[in-house]
Image: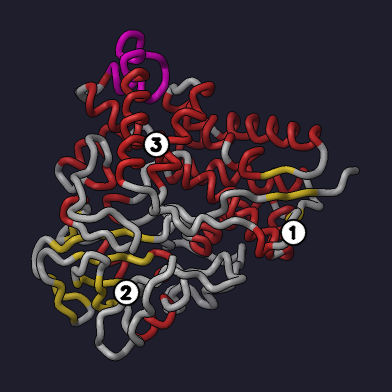
């Protein structure tokens, strides 16, 4: 994603959002973010539509804004930070999309769902996650060395789990995955995105009608039976959860595997120490930050880090820069699975912290060690620089991950 270089930090001139990653560094944030964080953790930023707002890169600054109710998440108040984004004002969030809501609307939806995503309930799914993981590893092994790990493992595991949780027939997964992939792209036309969104809603409407007629023992069935959500709201919430539960976890499993294979000493530590898995997941979330950016808008004048932010100004929060802040995480550019990475912002912070984070943790904690133990000689099948990266997507990661291993 090419654009004019940002002015040098420290000059006081507005910067533009760095988006180009250094060649040969697939796990590092875009070049320029670290320099900005060191010089100006809260910098003036020029947006592609000409708006002048702010870019936050320091950990304490980013975390403070995410937890501050004076900053809104409503899409229609935001300016899009990426060069290839939509032209003109953003539309309001679709019904049920909690990412683009503020309290009290957000609070209503969050309360309905929080009790259904508890740590205890997600851990109860771990046996099923283990079963599905084993089934896909068996299929990989029986097929012999050589596969795309995204298609063989990283994508179907979260798809099956979220389908079972919500009550979506797994046979329908390709239909909604195609729509979700398009919606996550940052370089498709608005018309293409609108068509994908319409297709997504059409599918969810059919599913909700089924749940209303015969509520099953699943999350959508529970909401259809026990909540006061309208059909439109239930369609929106279902679509939001379905999309959110797929892409981020898929890319954490795939990109996490890529990172581990590129750091063999870390892969070996995870392979040989079963107790390391929960800690390893937190470090991978910090190190990779596959959902790298959050955007907010000031609802009133705010002073932060000694700088004024005016009402109506947009602030882009670089979670990937914050998670590499040396003031919060010593030696932040090193992947260290034994690091205590608590407090990372990989799942966000504040009222919009990821609702399904416990489900994602369960899947990664089971899947990554199991993969490494089943295939102790697992390695990339092509040079690392040939792995296709998702540089034009809202969720970073890999499009494909060709891997191979030695047969016994």
Residue sitting at x 59%, y 46%? 365
> Within the magenta stretch, is there residue 6?
no
- Of residues 394 and 106, the one nearer the viewer is 394
Relative vertical location of residue 145 with respect to residue 279 in this rendering, above or below: above
Q: What is the distance, in whole Å, between disc 3 and disc 1 at their CAs?
A: 32 Å
Quarter of the picture holding the N terminus: bottom left
Relative vertical location of residue 310 with respect to residue 269 in this rendering, above or below: below
Residue 391 image point, x, y percent: 48, 59
Residue placed under numbered mark 3 in the picture: 117
**Residue 90 placement, left or right of 210:** left
**Residue 138 placement, left or right of 329:** right
Does dot 2 land on a helix, a strand or a loop?
loop
Q: What is the distance, in whole Å, between disc 1 and disc 2 at their CAs?
A: 40 Å
Q: Residues within 10 Å of mark 1 (few under 14, many from 20)?
A: some
- How many marks the image carries: the answer is 3
Residue sitting at x 51%, y 77%? 330
Residue placed under numbered mark 1 in the picture: 268
The residues colored magenta run 208-225
Residue placed under numbered mark 2 in the picture: 16
């Amino acid at each position: 994603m090419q654009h004019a270089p940002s002015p040098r930090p420290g000059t006081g001139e507005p910067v533009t959002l760095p988006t180009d990653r250094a060649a040969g560094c697939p796990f590092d944030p875009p070049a320029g973010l670290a320099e900005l964080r060191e010089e100006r953790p809260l910098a003036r930023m020029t947006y592609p539509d000409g708006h002048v707002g702010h870019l936050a890169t320091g950990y304490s600054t980013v975390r403070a804004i995410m937890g501050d109710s004076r900053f809104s998440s409503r899409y229609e108040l935001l300016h899009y930070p990426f060069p290839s984004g939509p032209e003109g004002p953003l539309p309001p969030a679709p019904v049920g999309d909690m990412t683009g809501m503020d309290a009290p609307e957000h609070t209503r939806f969050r309360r309905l769902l929080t009790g259904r995503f508890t740590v205890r309930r997600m851990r109860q799914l771990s046996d099923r996650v283990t079963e599905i993981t084993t089934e896909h590893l068996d299929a990989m092994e029986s097929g012999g060395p050589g596969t795309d790990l995204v298609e063989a493992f990283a994508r179907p595991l979260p798809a099956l789990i979220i389908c079972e949780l919500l009550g979506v027939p797994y046979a329908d997964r390709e239909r909604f995955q195609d729509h979700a992939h398009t919606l996550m792209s940052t370089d498709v036309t608005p018309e293409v995105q609108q068509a994908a969104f319409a297709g997504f809603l059409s599918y969810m409407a059919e599913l909700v009608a089924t749940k209303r007629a015969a509520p099953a023992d699943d999350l959508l069935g529970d909401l259809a039976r026990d909540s006061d959500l309208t059909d439109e709201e239930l369609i929106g919430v279902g679509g939001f959860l379905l999309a959110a539960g797929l892409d981020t976890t898929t890319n954490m499993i795939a990109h996490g595997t890529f990172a581990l294979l590129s750091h063999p000493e870390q892969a070996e530590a995870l392979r040989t120490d079963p107790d390391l898995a929960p800690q390893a997941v937190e470090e991978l979330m910090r190190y990779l930050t596959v959902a790298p950016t959050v955007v907010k808008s000031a609802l009133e004048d705010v002073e932060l880090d000694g700088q004024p932010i005016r009402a109506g100004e947009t602030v882009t929060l670089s979670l990937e820069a914050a998670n590499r802040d040396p003031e919060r995480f010593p030696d932040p550019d090193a992947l260290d699975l034994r690091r205590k990475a608590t407090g990372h912002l990989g799942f966000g912070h504040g009222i919009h912290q990821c609702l399904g984070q416990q489900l994602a943790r369960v899947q990664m904690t089971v899947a990554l060690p199991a993969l490494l133990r089943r295939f102790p000689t697992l390695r990339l099948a092509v040079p690392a620089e040939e792995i296709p990266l998702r540089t034009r997507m809202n969720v970073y990661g890999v499009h494909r991950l060709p891997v191979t291993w030695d047969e016994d």
